[in-house]
Image: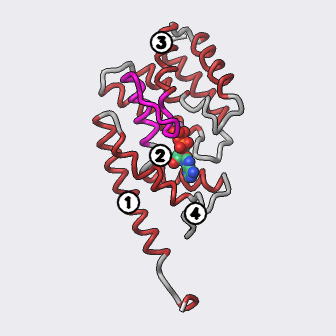
């Protein structure tokens, strides 16, 4: 298979696999991440093909989304080998995906890994990041917000994760886009608090 066939087939596979997702990890998430991976790879003089491929496949073994992450990872590696990638290229893609997760907190060890991490993180902030946070929270039965500081809520997730992302970016363009998106997240939180704190007749 040539490179565009590999990407086309991978896209089809991802659209089939994630089409029913309601946790903010639908195929649209994978496509935005793949797109940013390609853009950032061009700017950083990395291989855009491997970057895009890693973007499409980065959540296939996410433990939130699949029962058996190890098996999912093995299937992904088999798929990449079937596509005709060399062992070195498969390892480069796997290594890039391994450090993508915010929760695991691993540091990227290659430039490709930094690119995939940035692409995934951009999708957690800005307008789309805000939408995904409430989609994820709703799908887990989580409250929007709460006065109880121990209650895990979607607004709390903004403070735990979203507000930190802009300072953790690796690439120049990733940083620029993240700081634009960060402003919107700040504005959204200010406005949420303002609307939430408007007192009316019932609370006198
Ligand atoms: P990753 O898969 O990169 O480790 P996460 O699983 O933390 O990232 O995030 C995936 C999406 O779900 C992001 O948009 C994130 O902000 C959102 N999300 C993750 N955990 C929560 C949570 N507890 N409440 C609300 N949204 C969440
Ligand atoms: Ni992701």
Q: Residues within 10 Å of mark 4 (few under 14, many from 20)?
A: some
What's the distance in space between the residues labelled 4 and 1, CA to CA? 17 Å
**Residue 76, image quadrant:** top right
Answer with left or right where residue 174 lies relative to residue 8.
left
What's the distance in space between the residues labelled 3 and 2, CA to CA? 27 Å
- Earlier in the chain: of badge 4 and badge 2, it is 2
Q: Is residue 96 magenta?
A: no
- Earlier in the chain: of badge 3 and badge 2, it is 3
- Residue underneath mark 2: 124
Q: Which residues are magenta?
A: 99-122
Answer with left or right where residue 142 lies relative to residue 107.
right
Mark 1: C-beta under 8 Å from nearest atom of ligand 1? no
Q: Position of residue 124 (x, y in %)?
A: 47, 46
Circles 4 and 2: CB atoms closer than 8 Å: no
Residue at position x 66%, y 19% from top? 75
What kind of colouring is applied to the model shown? Answer: secondary structure
**Residue 48, image quadrant:** top left
Circles 1 and 2: CB atoms closer than 8 Å: no
Residue at position x 47%, y 81% from top? 198
Mark 4 or 3, closer to the camera: 4
- Asked if one can make out residue 29 in the rendered structure from this viewpoint, the answer is no
Q: Residues within 10 Å of mark 1 (few under 14, many from 20)?
A: some
- Asked if one can make out residue 17 in the rendered structure from this viewpoint, the answer is yes
- Residue underneath mark 4: 144
Residue at position x 67%, y 32% from top? 17
* Disc number for residue 186: 1
Mark 2: C-beta under 8 Å from nearest atom of ligand 1? yes
């Amino acid at each position: 298979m040539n490179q565009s066939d590999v990407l086309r087939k991978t896209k089809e596979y991802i659209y089939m696999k994630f089409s029913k997702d309601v946790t903010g990890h639908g195929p649209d998430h994978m496509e935005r991440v793949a797109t940013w991976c390609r853009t950032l790879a061009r700017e950083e003089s990395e291989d855009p093909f491997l970057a895009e491929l890693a973007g499409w496949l980065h959540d296939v073994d996410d433990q939130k989304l699949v029962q058996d992450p190890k098996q999912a990872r093995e299937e992904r590696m088999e798929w990449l080998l079937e596509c005709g990638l060399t062992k070195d290229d498969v390892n480069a893609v796997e290594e890039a995906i391994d450090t993508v997760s915010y929760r695991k907190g691993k540091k990227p060890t290659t430039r490709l890994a930094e690119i995939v991490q940035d692409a995934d993180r951009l999708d957690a902030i800005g307008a789309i990041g805000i939408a995904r946070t409430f989609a994820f929270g709703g799908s887990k039965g989580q409250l929007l917000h709460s006065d109880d500081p121990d209650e895990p809520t979607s607004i709390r997730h903004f403070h735990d994760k979203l507000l930190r992302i802009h300072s953790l970016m690796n690439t120049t363009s990733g940083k620029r886009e993240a700081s634009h998106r960060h402003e919107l997240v700040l504005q959204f939180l200010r406005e949420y608090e303002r609307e939430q704190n408007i007192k009316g007749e019932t609370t006198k």
